[in-house]
Amino acid sequence: DFVQKTDAHIDPISELPLDYSQAPLDKPVVLVGYGQVGRRIAETLRAAELPFVVIERHREVVEALRNEGVAAIAGDAHETEVLLHAQITQASMLVITVSDTMAAQPIMDQAIAIDPSLEIVLRTQSEEEWRLLREQQLGTVFYDAHELAKNMAVHILSRYEVDTASLDLPD
């Protein structure tokens, strides 16, 4: 059973503070990584007032987030216990923003083992990995260069007042 508690003493920063852990968030987004991409996603979730929990390896980042009132825990998301502390069993979505797709695979494996129906969103920096992950249908995959090029092209077209809705843009 994935929800078993351990008897080992756990570092308090690797668990959510009591105000979050005693009153679970309502279908939070579990956000893995708080680098350039994760931070922007978190800012958007916060602006939309959507509940989220950040899993981040760097303690100082977690401490700063907590000081800002953000639910965050320190740890490696590929560990089942870390995902459980982040309320993955109540989550609406798992968003993996780490740039290393090889590091993302064990996180996805653990999350799917806990909840096979959990929606997963992740990024990749490799077109080959993007194609492979899309074929595996494990979640929604965003290829960094593809998304950047698509957004830049849409911006360019908008300057020429081209209606992008009517175009068949590459997937």
Image (tube, rainbow, N blue to C red):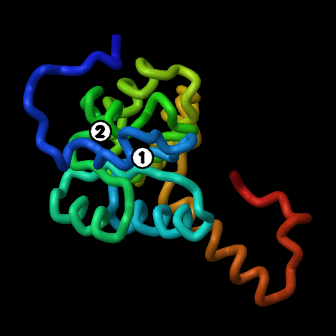
How crowded pointer 2 is (Cα within 10 Å; few <14, some 14-19, many 20+) is rated as many
Badge 2 amino acid: Ala
> What residue sits 87% from the left and 65% below the top?
165
Judge left or right: residue 168 versus residue 92.
right
| Position of residue 37 measured from the top left corner of the image (x, y, whole percent) | 42, 63
Residue positioned most to the left: 9
Q: Is residue 104 above or below residue 80?
A: below
Residue positioned most to the bottom: 159
Mark 1, residue position: 96
| Position of residue 53 measured from the top left corner of the image (x, y, whole percent) | 41, 50
Q: Nearer the viewer, residue 107 or 146?
A: 107
Q: Which mark is residue 77?
A: 2
| Residue 61 in sight here | yes
| Position of residue 79 measured from the top left corner of the image (x, y, whole percent) | 25, 30
Q: Earlier in the sequence, mark 1 or mark 2?
A: 2
Judge left or right: residue 122 versus residue 10.
right
The answer to which quarter of the image holds residue 9 is top left
Q: Tags 1 and 2 in contact by the CB under 8 Å rule?
A: yes
Mark 2 falls on what kind of element? loop
* Pair 1/2: label in front: 2
> What residue sits 51% from the left and 37% below the top?
91
